[in-house]
Image (spheres, rainbow, N blue to C red):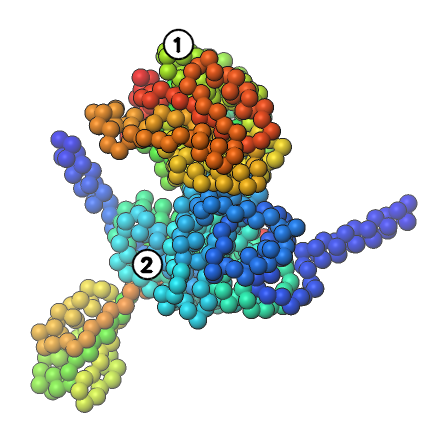
Amino acid sequence: MVNGSNRCSQTIIDMERQWYTISVYSENNVGLLNRISGIFLKRHINIESLNVSKSEIEHVSKFTIVIYSTEDWARKIVGQIEKQIEVIKAFYHTDDETIYQESAIFKIASHLLFDERQIQNIIKESNSQIVTVSRDFFVLAKTGRRHEIDEMHDALEPFGIMQFVRSGRIAVTKATMPITNILEEFHNQ
Amino acid sequence: MIMGISSIKVERMNTETLRKEERKTSKTIRISGAEAIIHCLLAEGVDLIYGYPGGAIMPVYDELYKFQDKLTHILTRHEQGATHAAQGYARVSGKVGVAMATSGPGATNLVTGLADAQIDSTPMVCITGQVPRHLLGSDAFQETDIVGISTPVTKWNYQVTNASEIPEILAKAFYIARSGRPGPVLVDITKNAQFDELDFSYEKCTGVRSYKPVPEPDLKSIEAAAELINNAKKPYIVFGQGVILGEAEEQLKALVEKAGIPAAWTILGLSAMDTEHPLNVGMVGMHGNYGPNVLTNECDVLIAIGMRFDDRVTGSLDTYAKQAKVIHFEIDPAEINKNVSADVAVLGDAKRTLELILPLITKNEHKEWRAEFAKKYQIEYDTVIKKDIEPTKEGLTMGEVIEQINKASGHKAVVVTDVGQHQMIACRYAKFKESKSNITSGGLGTMGFALPAAIGAKMGAMDREVVAIIGDGGYQMTIQELGVIFQHNVPVKIVVLNNDHLGMVRQWQELFFESRYASTVMTNPDFVKIAEGYHIKSRRVVERSDLKDAVVEMIASKDPYFLEVRVEKEDNVFPMIPSGASVSDIRLK
């Protein structure tokens, strides 16, 4: 009975879970990644994807973090991230509210390009680019949604992939992110 | 007349220029990083620090030696003691406490104190030495990644590897520690940065661009809160440490009195309001008072001020104040809707927001509603309180000891408690007239907190009586700090309530683990002899007839004093909300 009711509430939580993209605008300081990742660790939440880069504002970094969670938890995590001294502002968004992509790079043996005609079709159909070709290998780059990259990976796998790597999600939001205004507010305090 | 105005102008200009000069010591001097650290501390008004030397911090200790007439360093007997002493000092004075340690084990020994200060929002700056920059990451002797280790338990931390960074980083550390919701900051300074020279000038930090310490109050939410309060039939205030940290004690009292609202405290809010005030109805939480807990689920508007709905306060959230509209006065936006959803959130500093709401509040008395609290108090008095503070059974109770301390100290003492049964009893029965008088480890529940924290509290308020109340378990976790009390003749009064058990865990074993007392029975040493070994005046009480006299003698003592009271071995603390139960299901026995 106790087990049963636990399972029931677990199912409800599972149903409420979805993908959230958390965007964090911050100062570019040593140790901040540790501080931010610690907040996920504390709540036992796995980071599905992580990307850190510069943002549209000079000297401001942007973390793009993907988690699979409930909205309640995403909100609380964002609150605790925002509380960190060097974080300017953090947001969370659903997939519908963002334009997002990932990048992948495939390293494949060069002879396959000539031996396996099918590979040329995969390159064309997947909208990927050949970055470089050498005597031994060539490199393909693909940008897109995760499932598109997965499909391309599945298509190429039977021929042999020498190396594969995929980046974290990068995303922009459909709504505006008023970071410049926030920074001005800080400045005018 | 005209002359008058222009002379005022000139005077104002002069003071402005002076102020600017005060802010910015534009004179640059060429000094070592270690000496710069001392100048930074002095510029921040620090005259007392706690710490322990070691290899990687020796250049700073060498400067401390030279500056000992301006800056007192207290050598605690363990680095953990340094942090708790700094915490006690900060909690009683409202100033930033400072602790210092060497690298490696010195630094890791600070972690418990940092975590305690983080969860209880205590302003503290810890400075640690670190191996020289060229050895970082090489597993050098006494090297540890203290910045990595302390990240989750600090409000901010930073590693200085270059002497020139010292003034700016220390200014920032003090600003962050004390501003907004206070907290601990750790600055790790490599040994080369201590030895190297820099062109030193100091400017106090007045802001960090990515950090907004105090949210701007929103007048609409204040109006909405006022409307809820004015229309409430059964309003109820629960106040926490935010009132003390924000120095909003007067404003809280004014609100309570004007609106006639019964008010209860969280353990860290205790002493923000006179415990004898007729509208002060007691403590909420697991071992709080009966009325304040049960009536949480009967009020129509719950006004939470500077508190964070800790699980020890709320019990089961599913059944916590579901009938009530909740107003949450809070400085930290991350606390809003974290545990309990607020119908109205009033962000900002408690003093400011309470000042803003006061004129909007209509006078009220809520006599019938207040009578409910009185009725519940009577029930609790008859079943629990009377037996605790005026026992007729043979063994001594912790409650009667607290009651004697109240009488002897006239409700004026600072009471420092450790963690466990004695802590709950002390917080239930200690009487306070003044704010910043109850010092305890609330959020983290750190055994061993009280003895060093009492040392810090006494040094932070030399004119006040400081009584540490400690259990026999927690006492032995930091007992070595008796050495500090002896060496510096710190006139704290130490009361050990000895029941030869880890009493609170034993109580849970009795109630929830069929009295299987796994590792909670203690064979204790002769505590009086230990105190005597440190040349501290001491006395043991085993009989009720001896108690009052001993407590009076202790309070009257001008010197440090140790009092051991042998209390009943297997007493339980009631009322009690069993873990995970509702506040309505509080047990009286």
Q: Position of residue B184 (x, y in %)?
A: 48, 48
Question: Between B456 and A18, which is closer to the camera in this rendering?
Answer: B456
Q: Residue at x 34, y 56 (%)?
A: A37
Mark 2 → mark 1, Cα distance in angstroms: 63 Å
Q: Chain of mark 2?
A: A
Q: Is residue B385 visible?
A: no
Relative to B25, is A73 on the left or the right?
A: left
User: Residue drawn 44% across and 26% down?
Assistant: B564
Discs 2, 1 touching: Cβ within 8 Å: no
Q: Position of residue B566 (x, y in %)?
A: 40, 22
**Residue tagged 2:** A65
Q: In this rendering, would B573 be left or right of B451?
A: left
Q: Can you say whether A180 is above or below B556 in the image?
A: below
Please name which of the two marks, 2 or 1, marks the residue nearer to the observer. Answer: 1
Q: What is the crowding at mark 1: few (fewer than 14 residues within 10 Å), some, or many (at least 20)?
A: few
Query: What's the amino acid at mark 1?
Result: Thr
User: Closer to the camera, B419 or A154?
Assistant: B419
Q: Report crowding for label 2: few under 14, some 14 to 19, many 20 or more residues within 10 A (C-alpha).
A: many
Q: Nearer the viewer, residue B215 or B273?
A: B273
| Image: B385 above or below A121 | above
Q: Are marks 2 and 1 on the same chain?
A: no
Q: Position of residue B116 (x, y in %)?
A: 42, 42
Query: Residue B508's quadrant in the figure?
Result: top left
**Which residue lies at the image location 56% right of the left edge and 69% below the top edge?**
B196
In the picture, which quadrant includes the C terminus of chain B? Answer: top left
Q: Secondary structure at mark 1?
A: loop
Q: Which residue is mark 1?
A: B392
Decide: is B523 above or below B166. above
* Amino acid on which the number 2 mark rests in the picture: Ile
Regarding mark 2 in the picture, which secondary structure is present there?
strand
- Residue at left 59%, top 55%? B64
